[in-house]
Each structure stands twice: as C-alpha cells, then as structure tokens.
Image: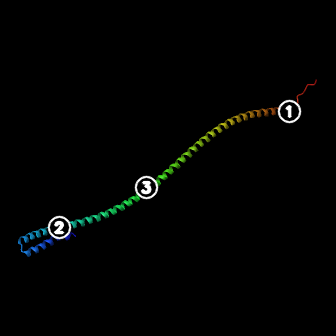
Amino acid sequence: MNAARMFAPLIVSLGLLVAAGCAGNKEKVEELEKLNATLEQDKQSLSEELASAQSSLEKTQADLEASKTELAGANEKVAELTTQLEAAKSGSADANARLAEARTKAAQVETELADLKAAYEKALADANAVSENLKAQIDVLNKKVAQLSEELEAARKALEDARKKEQEPPPEVPEP
C-alpha cells in the first residue's frame, strides 16, 4: 500500500513526461525532468526511511519478544513466590494454631499445678494438725502410762507387802 502511494507520483510524472515529449514542449520536459529528479530523491529518501523504519520495527519486535520472554519468566517467578507465600501463610497459620493450643494447654497445666499446690498445702496443714493432735494425745497417753506405771508399782509393792504379811506367822496375841 505504501509502495503504491510512493510510486504513484512517479508514474504520473512519467506519463506527463511522455505527453510533453510528444508535444515537443522543451520547457515542460525540463520541468518534468526536474520533477522526476525530485521524485527520485524523494523515492530514495523514502526508501531509506522505510528501510530504517523496518529495521527499527524488527529491533522493536525483537525487543518486544525479549520483553515477553522476560515477562513470562517474571510471571513464573511471581507464581512461584505466590505459592511460597501461600505455603508460608499456611505454615504460619498452622504454627499460630499450635502456639494457641500450646498456650491453652500451658494455662490448663498451670491451673492444675496451682490446684495441686493448694491441695498439697492443705494436706500438709492437715497433716501438721493431725501430727500436733497425735503429739498431744501421745503426751496424754504417756502421762496416763506414767500414772498407771506408778499405780502398778504401788500395787505391786502393796501385793508384795501383803504376801509378806501372809507368810509371816500371825502375831501372837497375848492371852487374857
């Protein structure tokens, strides 16, 4: 399409040149030759511009292809990083869930430990109270044992004295 536009004035000028040559008009021929020379220069300039534009287009297309390749690589990297990010988020969510569960269990253990400590302290206080009570009862029983030992000793002595008296001949009673 561009070539047809570029060569159309050339074809028209050639037609005019032929017509002018036939008519024998020298001035018109010279004018047409100048016009033809100008058209040739324009054609040459346009051909160079076209070649330059095609070269630029090819370079731009090559750059575009390189950019597309880089973009595809970047998109793959983004997809890979997105996958890694999602995995990290999932792992983080799992870790947070496990942490929350561990904290809950730790709180339960602390509560149980506090309950056990309170129960231990109560049992220790109860044991101390029972121990003091038993010590008091033992003191009372020791006093009773001591008292009973004294009474037993006194009873033995009395029994011994009574046996001795029995074994002694009866006292002689003076006769009246």
Q: Residue furthest top?
A: 176
Element on which disc 2 rests: helix
Q: Is residue 49 left or right of residue 99?
A: left
Q: Which residue is mark 2?
A: 46
Q: Is residue 176 left or right of residue 157?
A: right
Identify which residue, 58 or 78, lies in the foreground. 58
Q: Nearer the viewer, mark 1 or mark 2?
A: 2
Residue 44, percent across and down? Answer: 15, 69
Q: Which residue is mark 3?
A: 89
Q: Earlier in the sequence, mark 1 or mark 2?
A: 2
Quadrant hosting residue 175: top right
Marks 2 and 3 sit apart, C-alpha to C-alpha, by: 61 Å
Element on which disc 3 rests: helix
User: Residue at horizontal 20%, vertical 71%?
Assistant: 4
Residue 104, percent across and down? Answer: 52, 49
Query: Can you say whether 155 is above or below 104 in the image?
Result: above
User: Residue at horizontal 70%, vertical 34%?
Assistant: 140
Q: Residue furthest front?
A: 23
Q: Amino acid at mark 3?
A: Lys
Quadrant hosting residue 133: top right
